[in-house]
Amino acid sequence: MLVEIKVPSVGESVTEAVLAQWFKKDGDRVQKGEALFVIETDKVTLEVEAEAEGMLKISVEEGETVAIGTVVGTIDTAAATAEAAQTEKGAKEEEVEKEPTEPKKAEAAEQEKTAPPPQEKAASAHEEQAAKPATEKKPIAADTNLSPAVRRIVKETGVDVGEVIGTGPAGRITKGDVILYLEAREAQAASAKVAPPVASETTAAAADEETSRKPMTPMRQRIAARLLEARQNTAMLTTFNDVDMTRVMEIRSHYKDAFQKKYGVSLGFMSFFIKAAVEALKEFPEINAFIDGKEIVYHHYYHIGVAIGTGRGLVVPVIRHCEKLSLAKMEQAIVDYVTKIKENRLDLADLEGGTFTITNGGVFGSLLSTPILNTPQSAILGMHRTEKRPVVIDDQIVVRSMMYLALSYDHRIVDGREAVTYLRRIKEFLENPERMIVEI
């Protein structure tokens, strides 16, 4: 029985995907539920699992763009059953062969009598080894993580895969990685050659100006298009402020162990920012709205997108109805999304419906930046790194843990007064977290 392997649907708006990488090669035996390949769309990356146990037959190579629903391979379940039966039969025959029959024992004894002495066998082996060509190459070790395309180019070029840095899912080596490695190796070999004395400085400089090309992934193309769309179709403006994080850090330090023990997740800063953003959004509905033609659409709920960086690009999964969630549930939602991203299980539905976005450049060390709108949303809040700085409090210079905040907004719907006041309101909530709890 043949079970078809199809490219699954990941959302109504997605019609095609790139088969990024096969985890198995043609002819491999696969188990039910085992990851077979990765597809990549302009929004998500997803692993596809085997629906049955059997022998894999690949009909579409990795790197090809295919429509949703396309059959990219099959699983032969009958072959798996036959192989299992053959294995069982072989095991039984092996048991039988463990006890040699009398004729076999006699034959073995006769061979032992006629066999050459150990010294002669060693000499013969030595002569055979010496007769082998000196230039004989060692076979390349098989690597089950390599795709058929990668195996082919590795075999043709003799590349040591241990020296190639993989950029695919879970660090797997792709065909592009091997090509880039070969180009870099050729460039190093060319630069090692001694240039003729008559070579000009221009020629020498040109030899060092090596370039390489790599096609943009669908996700990267989508990110580029959305960012350009935000710059071209909105009147984006950014306002800045700073916030004293001392009180939030004290609360987090004091309760983190009890919080972890009770809820099973760590108490991070992001839940405080989501809570502060939601409480402030209740006072400024335009910031939680968007423009649709000549109308303003107001949301009476708060779906907050949290920007998370991945090896393939930035994704913004949405935590829904944050106005109803506790800090623990927000932190759990973030942990769940991070896990899904690492395992390539993020669904398109996880990225849709956001009304406001928070991005944290501080995890990468950013001191200050201007975040770009996540259209069609009207605003985005940018967090940055926390560092100790001298500030004046009650006419005294003291050291406090400070963070710069940035709010980018669409000036077509949000006035400067509202944006500045909204950001100041977030500052007040974070500097006095108790206010969020009693909602004053």
Image (tube, rainbow, N blue to C red):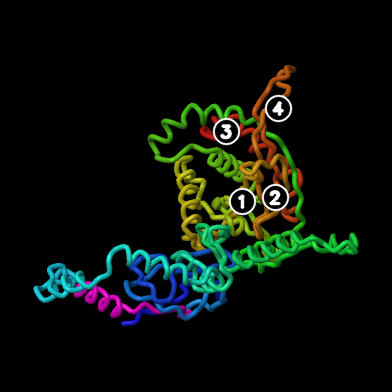
Numbered mark located on residue 440 in the image: 3
* Residue matched to label 4: 389
Q: What's the amino acid at mark 3?
A: Ile
User: Label 2: which residue?
Assistant: 371
* Above or below for 392 versus 231: above
Q: Which residues are magenta?
A: 70-90
On screen, residue 132 versus residue 104, left or right, reads: right
Q: Nearer the viewer, mark 1 or mark 4?
A: 4
State the CA–CA distance, disc 2 to disc 4.
23 Å
Disc 1 to disc 2, how far (Cα)?
10 Å
Q: Residue at x 49, y 26 (%)?
A: 254
Q: Nearer the viewer, residue 256 or 321?
A: 256
Amino acid type, residue under disc 4 in the picture: Arg
Q: Which of the 4 image quarters holds residue 369?
A: top right
Q: Position of residue 271 (x, y in %)?
A: 53, 41
Specify the amino acid type for callout 2. Answer: Pro
